[in-house]
Amino acid sequence: MIKYPNGTPNKKVTHISKAESKARKSLSSANRGMDLESDINLSNEYYLEKDLCVITKRPTPINVVKVDYTKGAIITNAYFEKQSTTDYNGVYKGRYIDFEAKSTKIKTSFPLHNITSHQIKHLERVLAHQGIAFFIIEFAARNEVYLLDAAYVIEFYKHGERQSIPYDVIKEKGHLVPRGFSPRLDYLPIVDKIYCKN
């Protein structure tokens, strides 16, 4: 029951779905820019509902060692089976898509230590087989999200003179992803513009 300032209850409260509740919470200024993964997941759910693409979060492979069944099957001991590759993959307009999502609180650059060598190797293989590969990079302090082609990140990672990609380079070479309600991060039009011109 919701009480308004004058103290009277409003009995006409409609049910809000979990997805809507998450999206509304994400929109509040306190949470804005705090959960990039949640924003991408909600966007992918929206795209799937609209039958635009099938892009899913890749699960992290873990090996469960011990489970506590006294509290409802809680994993108490586990380890990563192997290194995961990237966060997301799927299909859009007949093309394979693979991307990594990263967030930084630094305003001036994106640190490359957030990326592992096996992720770079994986994305190189995707590109070699004509797949679409990119990074979604959030500058949380600026409340900005960019889509940056994986080739730029690979180049900086392997041949760059510094251990980070300057914000100005990402702003120039990348594409600002619009924020909204549904979808939260509308990155598919950028994928169209860069990779699906034909």
Image (cartoon, rainbow, N blue to C red):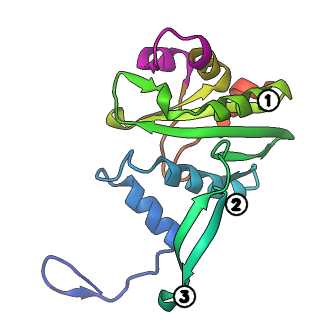
Using the numbered discs, state the Cα–Cα distance from disc 2 to disc 1 in whole angstroms. 30 Å
Considering the numbered disc 3 on the image, is that residue within a helix, a strand or a loop? helix
Q: Which residue was labeled with disc 2?
A: 49
90 with respect to 167 (left or right): right
Considering the numbered disc 2 on the image, is that residue within a helix, a strand or a loop? helix
- Residue type (three-letter) at the residue carrying disc 1: Arg
* Viewer-nearest of discs 3 and 1: 3
Considering the numbered disc 1 on the image, is that residue within a helix, a strand or a loop? helix
Q: Are marks 2 and 1 in contact (CB under 8 Å)?
A: no
Q: Is 148 in the magenta?
A: no
- Residue type (three-letter) at the residue carrying disc 2: Glu
Using the numbered discs, state the Cα–Cα distance from disc 3 to disc 1 in whole angstroms. 42 Å
Percent of width and height locating residue 58: 68, 53
Q: Which residues are magenta?
A: 157-174
Count residues near mark 3 (Cα–Cα under 10 Å), then give few for <14, some for 14-19, many for 20+.
Answer: few
**Closest to the observer: 55 or 6?**
55
Q: Which residue was labeled with disc 3?
A: 69
Q: Earlier in the sequence, mark 2 or mark 1?
A: 2
Looking at the image, which residue is at 49% across and 66% down? 20
